[in-house]
Amino acid sequence: MSDQKKEIFDGVAQRLKIEGFNVVNRDETRPWGGFFVIDEDQAQQFANVYFDGLNVDELKISGKLSPKILIVAPNTRLSWQYHHRRAEIWRVVNGTVGVSTSDTDDQGEVQQLAPAQTIKLKQGERHRLIGLDDWGIVSEIWQHTDPANPSDESDIVRVQDDFGR
């Protein structure tokens, strides 16, 4: 792992600790960067800090929400993907990132999102997070849509992937 990547991850980990969040998973092995998963019991606290106090009750589809922090490396992109069991809301924390969305398998235009900008992704909507010139840090809340079968990392349908996954 590059020194810069380690520095970014350690900085985010320190910030989350100071803010009082319980990190239940830290994954810095992804070819595009990685993520931190926050305790689901802290969803409202997470929304207070990272989504301007958004009321999580208004986000609930099936009652369960999962907060995460995504870190995307410069000039990399996550897979062009969608999910069967979740919708998502993203808000840029640091850096400028690219986001592409579409209702079909054809990738849409890339829009740039700056810090404090938010995007909502519907269940089944194709989407891709793209690292631009600098490291991007994005807060994310999964909105689970199936209470009997909550979404997880296996709930990813990859339409296209730069890393052959």
Image (cartoon, grey):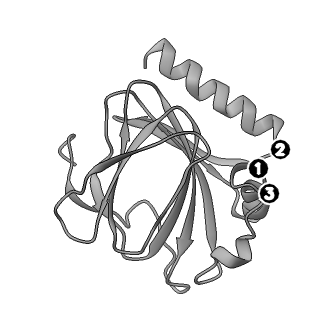
Q: Which mark is residue 32?
A: none
Amino acid residing under circle 3: Gln
Could you give the CA–CA distance between mark 1 and mark 2, rounded to whole angstroms? 11 Å
Could you give the CA–CA distance between mark 3 and mark 2, rounded to whole angstroms? 9 Å
The answer to whether mark 3 and mark 2 are in CB contact below 8 A is yes
Residue 159 location, quadrant: bottom left
Q: Quadrant of the N terminus?
A: top left
The answer to whether mark 3 and mark 1 are in CB contact below 8 A is yes
Decide which of tag 1 and tag 2 comes sooner along the chain. 2
- The residue where tag 1 is placed is 49
Residue 14 location, quadrant: top right
- Residue in view at x 65 percent, y 32 percent: 12
Mark 2 secondary-structure assignment: loop
Left or right relative to 8: residue 121: left
- Considering only vertical position in the picture, is 41 above or below 117? below
Q: Which mark is residue 45?
A: 3
- Considering only vertical position in the picture, is 54 above or below 6? below
- Residue in view at x 78 percent, y 59 percent: 53
Could you give the CA–CA distance between mark 3 and mark 1, rounded to whole angstroms? 6 Å
Q: Which mark is residue 20?
A: 2
Camera-nearest label, 3 or 2? 3
Mark 1 secondary-structure assignment: helix
Q: Nearer the viewer, residue 43 or 97?
A: 97
Amino acid residing under circle 2: Gly
